[in-house]
Image: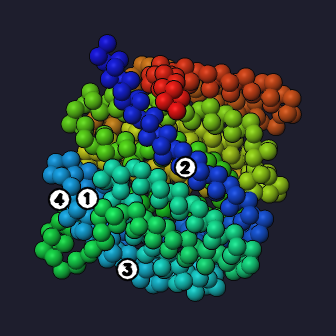
Amino acid sequence: MATDKKRSTISSHILKYTGLLGGVQALYVLLSIVRNKFTAELIGAVGLGLIDLYTRATTLMGSLTSMGINMSAVRQLSAIKAEKGDEEAKKYVGIVRSWVFVTALLGALATIIASPMLSLMLTKNYDHILDFCLLAPVVAFTTIASGETAILKGVHQLGRLAYVTAAGAIALLCIAVPLYWIAGLGGIIPVLLLSTGAAMVISLRATHRHYPYRINLFSPEFKAEGRRLLTMGMAFMAAGAVASGAEMLVRAFIVQQSGLSESGYYAAGFTITVSYARLVFMAMDADYFPRLTAAHTNRRESNNIANRQIDILVLLIAPFLIFFALMLPILVPLLYKAEFTIVIPMVLCALFYMFFKAIYSPIAYYSLAHANSRLFLTMEVAYNIVFVAAICIGYHKWGLLGAGIGLSVANLFDMLNVSIVYAWRYKFRFEWGTLQRIGIQFALLTAGIAASWHTPWAVRLTVGLPIFLLSAAYSWRLLQHETQLTEKLRSMLHKK
């Protein structure tokens, strides 16, 4: 009885913060839909391709120069606040900010130096050197904003984190649409500069009230504590650089094979697959990671927390993906333009990518919780090698359809690899009930995607809609049982 109560408490906690941050992410997605629609109409597939290339380039440069502080700071701050209190956490925030400031400047300088290489690699010529130089501040702004977000996660101020996400999405929409309307393709770099600058200001405002912005590059603690911060962060930096490099290699390969327009279609397909489902994963970094870190010495508790997180993710994402698959012929023209419907087969094949991610993501945090940077980096390198190979081979053979297959194959590999290695290293075990839920929802998702494949609307709805309703009902019943969701909703309504 006590075990069931504990399971319910953990599941309720996960669902609460998934709802809080997922609700904000839903707003983010809604605003992204509006922004992407206008962007596609105003600058087309070529513009989307350029935005994607510029974004991947700045992400790579940020990953190479950020020293992984945005990840290592979360773990360190969480531990300091729990063990030593808020005053010590405030001192550590100053150290984090000092190092983030240094890495932000380093990132901007490195982007300017690397601009000829980036232009040649991504566009096959040197015509965009000035563009990449102008993007140097984007790297600095993003690094500083990521540092402030890490502080909010580390001190567990999830309400302010939600505010930063929502305000950033609104700012991006208000900046992007008018500039693309006025300047077309010429508005891309100004949009990136202004939107990342706005995100930085918003994140600084969110943290300033409790942690006023101060840096000290000459204090003894800057070097002493910074050494530990950087030692932990180097693996995160390397992993981030590997992931960003892999993404950029895929884009460069598609541009070399088919040009910027095709890269734009791939970017749209990837965005549709990943971005609109990520609201389910929003609470992972902010809530799940600190809790798993706190329990990492207790194997039974860690397994319980991880299995509950997998349960919630699988039960939430499976009905969403099925509905998404059924509605793609309506959603794609709504999100972009009618010409983008060519990405529908890619998205259908890639939807398994997100389902597999829901299973292995909670397990993958084990190495982070145990501060095992070497294992974390090894797993990331292995995945990204398979990621690049699977997508490039798939795209070369079958175009965008093959890219979608490659995405799912890469994540299937990662799911199997993470599950096996972490079962050996950390004694992680799937609970039988969790495996049952995964199996049932995977079967329903497969049936839903099959019903969505080149079928008339009559077949799509008569076959696919019952599958969606079955998946949703199954998830609702289990979520209600695990979290007493119905009773809590009734209580909320009664209070109102």
In percent of width and height, residue 274 lies at 59, 49
> Where 261 falls versus 448 (above or below)?
below
For marks 3 and 4 on the same chain, the one whose residue lies earlier in the sequence: 4
Please, what secondary structure does the residue beneath circle 1 have? helix
Q: Which residue lies at the image location 37% right of the left edge and 44% below the top edge?
A: 287
- Circle nearer the viewer, 4 or 1: 4
Quarter assignment of residue 392:
bottom right
Q: Amino acid at mark 3?
A: Leu
Q: How is the image coloured?
A: rainbow
Q: Earlier in the sequence, mark 1 or mark 2?
A: 2
Real-space Cα separation, disc 2 to disc 4, in angstroms: 32 Å
Q: Nearer the viewer, mark 1 or mark 2?
A: 2
Q: Earlier in the sequence, mark 3 or mark 1?
A: 3
Q: Which of disc 4 and disc 2 is earlier in sequence?
A: 2
- Quarter the N terminus occupies: top left
Dot 2 and dot 4 residues touching (CB under 8 Å): no
Q: Nearer the viewer, residue 367 or 212?
A: 212
Give the labeled residue for mark 3: 105
What residue is disc 1 on? 232
Name the front one of labels 2 and 3.
2
Rendered residue at 26%/64% (across/down): 93
Kindly check if marks 3 and 4 are in contact, taking CB atoms under 8 A apart as contact.
no
State the CA–CA distance, disc 1 to disc 2: 29 Å
Label 4: which secondary element: helix
The label on residue 25 is: 2
Counting from the top left corner in percent of width and height, residue 393 is at 62, 52
- Residue 146 can be seen in this image: no
Q: Nearer the viewer, residue 493 or 344?
A: 493
Task: Report the residue marked by disc 4.
Answer: 88
